[in-house]
Amino acid sequence: MGLFRNVAIVGAGMTRFHNRIHVGKTGRDLFVEAVLEAADSVDKGFELREAEAIFIGNYSSDCFEGQSHTAALISDWLGLTPRPSIRVEDACASSGVAINMAALAVASGAYDLVIVGGFEKMTGRETEEATEILAMAADALYEVPVGFTFPGLYAAIATAHFKRYGSSWEELAAITIKNHRNGALNEKAHFQSDIMDTARRLGERHNMTFKDELEFLRSPLNPFVAYPLRLFDCCPISDGASALIVASSDIAKRYTDTPIYIKGFGQASDTFSLHDREELTELKATRIAASQAYKMAEVSPEDIDVADVHDCFTIAEVLAVEDLGFFPKGQGGKAALEGRTSLDGERPINPDGGLKAKGHPVGATGAAMAYEMFKQLRGEAGRRQVDDAEIGLAQNVGASGATVVVQVYGR
Amino acid sequence: MEEKPFTTGSYREFLESGRIMANRCRNCGSVHLPPRPICPRCGGRSLSWMEIQGRGTLQAFTVVHVPPKRLRGREPYATGIVKLEGGPSVSGLILDVKRGEDINIGAEVEAVVVREEDGVKLCFRLV
């Protein structure tokens, strides 16, 4: 697929992702906050009213906040009526897909400058209710009534992966440890303490001490959510929003000398129910979306210097690094265990802490990945900066892989 | 039976009478459970009903400790993906299992149709 013209990000902003600090705010408050930060981040200045359209990823403000029709609400709250405003709902991939829609709209020549982002206000509901709302992204007839939750679906994938490749929960624990270590370096992350600090803090409360991370992660303080996945294999429930200012390459340099180009993007769907997949140990839609994005960007997996992947559960990071072509099938978890995906490894994965430590306000996640790539590729990622990062990738998954969207970013 | 449309409602009605009904594509032979109106493999729309016997093997599983609200009080419970004799795979509760260590992929299971408050469900029991 060729594009009529190229598309770049010229500004990016996000709220901190968290479960408590946004009490009293609604989704619209969070999104406006992210958009204002994105606007202020534009090097040569940007007025909101220069935007011609808005693309918003949001999973379920309907169920979480009792508010539908959020695209128009956001347009109004940003003071941007009568511009068109479009909501995209693709479960956890909502704002990742919104980025592709925005890129297509700008590449087509229809618009020169748009705002794209996402938000989710999740903590207004109890955990059980939130679990139920999230499970609506699985098959309401054939998966949910027989007990599948999202942790449950990914747990089932993990059992199949362990069996087929001899992979193990210890490899998943290495991903937990890595992503928390990275999150500790990210001021926007939900969790900003590494696993050893977390073990000390929780241990003190329960009169327990732990000699290392694994002892803590195997302890009753890390209970099963869905066997074999434990609490620290799962991303938290967070509130948050993220936003990008996206411009055509014709005008991007008016806004910054260092735009970050969306060099390639792809999207694929797969069977809605996990049980209909011929292969349970991969996300086929990742492979297809990635091959589209690689082709458009004219790069191969080896060229990617840094990537944010969709680690809603630790096993999902294993699948991602394998299906994106970074490591052979069955070796994704081992790569983390050997430090190959750490900040100082050969292929840093989730430098911002991933969904695991940064948090996962569902609709905000895809654009928050783009935010991280924008910072990394401009050398503005501070303590978590990956050296010489020139080409980045984001992989954003909807539900158990029925939607996957991939972007390749470059300077 | 041949008159029933290939809808989610027909599948449920069959299940309520204790039968597991799939459909088969007359063009490419692939089998779909639950039945579908369009063959996802070849796009074919010429389909026929096919009864599935309830034996199968476990392909993947979990034991859920944090349930959604509607299954509160039932945890921990096991659920999994079963490949049935005749081709299709399907999700179902694995009855009487409380610990992940007590089941294995490859285990043989048998279907049980269970009636619950929120409807009739396809479940499995280890054989």
Image (tube, coloured by chain):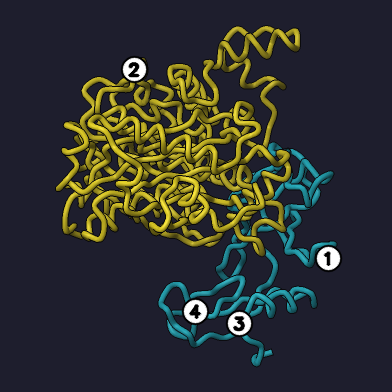
Chain colours: A yellow, B cyan
Per the image, the residue denoted by label 1 is: B115
| Quadrant of the rendered image containing residue A37 | top left
Q: Chain of mark 4?
A: B
What amino acid is labelled 4 in the image? Answer: Ile
Labels 2 and 1 in the same subunit: no
Amino acid tagged 1: Arg
- Residue that numbered label 2 is attached to: A382
The residue pinned by badge 4 equals B38
* Residue at x-position 70% and y-position 7%: A204
- Residue B6 bears which disc, if any? 3
Please rate how many residues cluster around mark 2, counting C-alpha atoms within 10 Å: few if below 14, some from 14 to 19, many from 20.
few
Q: Are marks 2 and 4 on the same chain?
A: no
| Mark 4: secondary structure | loop
Of all chains, the one bearing label 2 is A
Q: Earlier in the sequence, mark 4 or mark 1?
A: 4
Real-space CA distance between mark 2 and mark 1, rounded to the nearest whole angstrom: 57 Å
